[in-house]
């Protein structure tokens, strides 16, 4: 999954390279031994409306993986951004009576501002209206043209302007509507450039046969494969009717169909993200493209075919998560979307409960990879019972007891072997799960230890031990073990709840907390995953009490 850092020129390879299916502990061990490149992307979001929780969800998921990999010492590149061309944006601009450029500038800024607000540590934010992106799209597409993969023809079909996609007959909703947006489709007929997708049927089938984890989870792999084996038709590559897009270099009357321009962002961004430095050789191919299932077909079928046509390497994995759903008044579940207007406002949640609470809730409540409902009621339950009562209380009482019974110094004794047993293998397990982007399962493993630590407090009853002077050693071991357990779970939780983890590790004297936004924090020894092993750090350090980490909202 992770590949060794490669150096050298930006090579156009004739096909995809086989990736040995390194799995499980071997991969974790390898990544602990040497630095690896880890390139992760989110979809680039349409600027036809403001961001909502669905966008935040994907981006936080990618952020959790990026942060975890940085803790492993990997060389991480994390990309997000906005998709600004094409009909969805042009039409939204027309409705609002502004130019597409004005609408794109306004909404791209909202997406850009969202990132620090949700503590997302992206390395770059790409906008497809950036001239550097457009130039690179033209170069790559010219290559696709020169390699003989395009031709001119007539297109006739049902088109959804919101999806910017032509629908096949078996994708049509009742009365020729879009199954996603529920709006009537337009019957379009025009002269277009076509991409010979059909000629990639065999190479794509081979890719799926040889790379069983190209699309994850398995259900999405099967969906993509069955789409391929049911027969691929050529797809429209350009549009002549709209001007808001990247000009086709060999036929400037046309602009590229927005999906071609959009997909290529994953490659183009590496060429200019950090001024003057082309990082393509270091980071391409991507380790993970993360997205929801609505755009599976583009990424699992068209994208690899396009890369093959351009002679570029294929990404290692696509991780396809489910939809966040919300119930309507009648109790029926719907995909949360801006067009259906049924969104849980992430900003309101964060204003009241903090960013970490939102980050935690999304990945605890909805298993990453599955659809799941979100609601203010289940948010409130998890906030109170898990964040405040289980984790917050564990932290407060551990630090308070060390303050009360040992003057705030963690005793310098060995940890309790019984608790050590329960933590055995935790860090590798979490790393292996996150290697497969199993964010919810990894969180569950960490949370089991949070619960174990709470049970340990009850079992050991330190307040009781403190009353019996001849049991002082037992109290030492108990407090030291609790502090160590708390440290380990906090380091592992850092990728999920970075602000709280930082506050807590600062209270334990492990790192500084200036109270500002949570930076990328690479090369901070206290956060390294290698140190997140129970018993890895000696006692003898001072801790401070913390105010409630997840207070009752006012
Ligand atoms: O499709 N649940 O942009 P988009 C979970 N520009 N995730 C959700 C969601 C929900 N209810 N709603 C949105 C586009 N998302 C194209 C992509 S990529 C080269 C071009 C997330 O603004 C999820 O990641 O419609 C989904 O795939 C994406 O937003 C769609 O964003």
Image: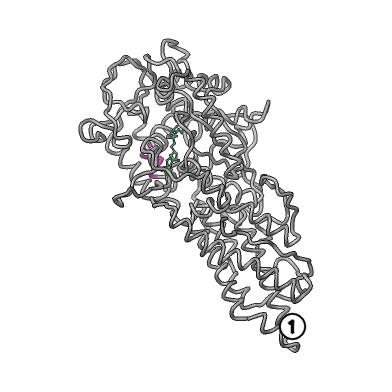
Q: Which residue is mark 1?
A: 473
Magenta extent:
204-209
Give the image quarter of residue 48.
Answer: top left
Name the spot of residue 234 as percent of width and height, x first.
32, 26
Depth check: give the residue in front, 539 or 285.
539
In magenta stretch: residue 456: no
**Residue drawn 65% across and 66% down?**
396
Residue 88 appearing in the image: yes
In magenta stretch: residue 206: yes
Depth check: give the residue in front, 418 or 23.
418
Name the spot of residue 529 as percent of width and height, x first.
65, 57
Name the spot of residue 399 as percent of width and height, x first.
70, 68
Say which element carries label 1: helix
Colour approach in the figure: one colour
Query: Is 495 left, or right, of 544 in this rendering?
Result: left
- State whether the magenta stretch is mostly helix, strand or loop: helix
């Amino acid at each position: 999954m992770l590949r060794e850092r490669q150096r050298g020129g930006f090579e156009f390879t004739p096909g995809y390279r086989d990736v040995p299916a390194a799995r499980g502990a071997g991969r974790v061990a390898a990544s602990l031994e040497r630095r690896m490149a880890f390139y992760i992307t989110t979809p680039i979001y349409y600027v036809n409306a403001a961001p909502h929780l669905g966008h935040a969800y994907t981006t936080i998921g990618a952020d959790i993986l990026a942060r975890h990999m940085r803790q492993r010492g990997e060389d991480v590149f994390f990309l997000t951004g906005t998709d600004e061309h094409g009909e969805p944006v042009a039409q939204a601009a027309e409705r609002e009576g502004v130019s597409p450029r004005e609408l794109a500038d306004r909404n791209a800024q909202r997406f850009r501002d969202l990132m620090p607000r949700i503590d997302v540590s992206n390395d770059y934010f790409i906008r497809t209206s950036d001239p550097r992106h457009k130039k690179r799209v033209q170069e790559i597409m010219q290559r696709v043209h020169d390699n003989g993969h395009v031709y001119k023809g007539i297109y006739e079909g049902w088109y959804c302007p919101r999806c910017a996609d032509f629908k096949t007959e078996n994708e049509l909703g009742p009365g020729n509507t879009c199954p996603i947006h529920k709006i009537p489709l337009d019957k379009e007929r025009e002269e277009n450039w076509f991409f010979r997708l059909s000629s990639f049927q065999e190479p794509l089938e081979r890719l799926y046969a040889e790379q069983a984890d190209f699309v994850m989870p398995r259900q999405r792999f099967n969906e993509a494969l069955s789409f391929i084996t049911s027969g691929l038709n050529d797809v429209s590559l350009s549009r002549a009717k709209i001007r808001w897009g990247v000009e086709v270099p060999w036929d400037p009357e046309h602009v590229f169909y927005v999906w071609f321009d959009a997909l290529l962002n994953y490659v183009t961004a590496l060429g200019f993200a950090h001024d003057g430095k082309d990082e393509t050789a270091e980071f391409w191919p991507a380790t993970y493209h993360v997205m929801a299932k609505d755009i599976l077909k583009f990424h699992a079928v068209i994208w690899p075919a396009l890369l093959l046509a351009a002679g570029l390497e294929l990404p290692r994995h696509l991780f396809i998560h489910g939809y966040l759903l919300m119930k309507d008044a009648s109790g029926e579940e719907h995909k949360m979307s801006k067009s259906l207007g049924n969104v849980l406002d992430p900003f309101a949640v964060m204003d009241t409960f903090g960013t970490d609470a939102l980050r935690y809730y999304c990945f605890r409540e909805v298993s990453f990879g599955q659809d799941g409902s979100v609601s203010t009621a289940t948010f409130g339950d998890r906030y109170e019972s898990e964040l405040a009562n289980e984790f917050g209380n564990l932290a407060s009482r551990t630090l308070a007891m060390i303050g009360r019974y040992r003057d705030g110094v963690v005793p310098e004794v060995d940890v309790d072997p019984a608790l050590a047993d329960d933590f055995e293998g935790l860090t590798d397990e979490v790393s292996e799960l996150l290697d497969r982007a199993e964010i919810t399962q990894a969180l569950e493993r960490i949370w089991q230890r949070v619960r174990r630590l709470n049970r340990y407090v009850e079992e050991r009853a330190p307040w009781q031990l403190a009353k019996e002077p001849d049991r002082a050693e037992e109290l030492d071991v108990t407090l030291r073990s609790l502090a160590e357990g708390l440290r380990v779970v906090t380091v592992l939780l850092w990728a999920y709840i970075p602000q709280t983890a930082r506050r807590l590790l600062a209270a334990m004297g492990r790192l500084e907390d200036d109270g500002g936004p949570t930076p990328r924090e690479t090369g901070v020894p206290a956060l390294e995953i290698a140190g997140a092993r129970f018993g890895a750090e000696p006692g003898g350090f001072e801790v401070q009490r913390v105010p409630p980490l997840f207070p009752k909202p006012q």
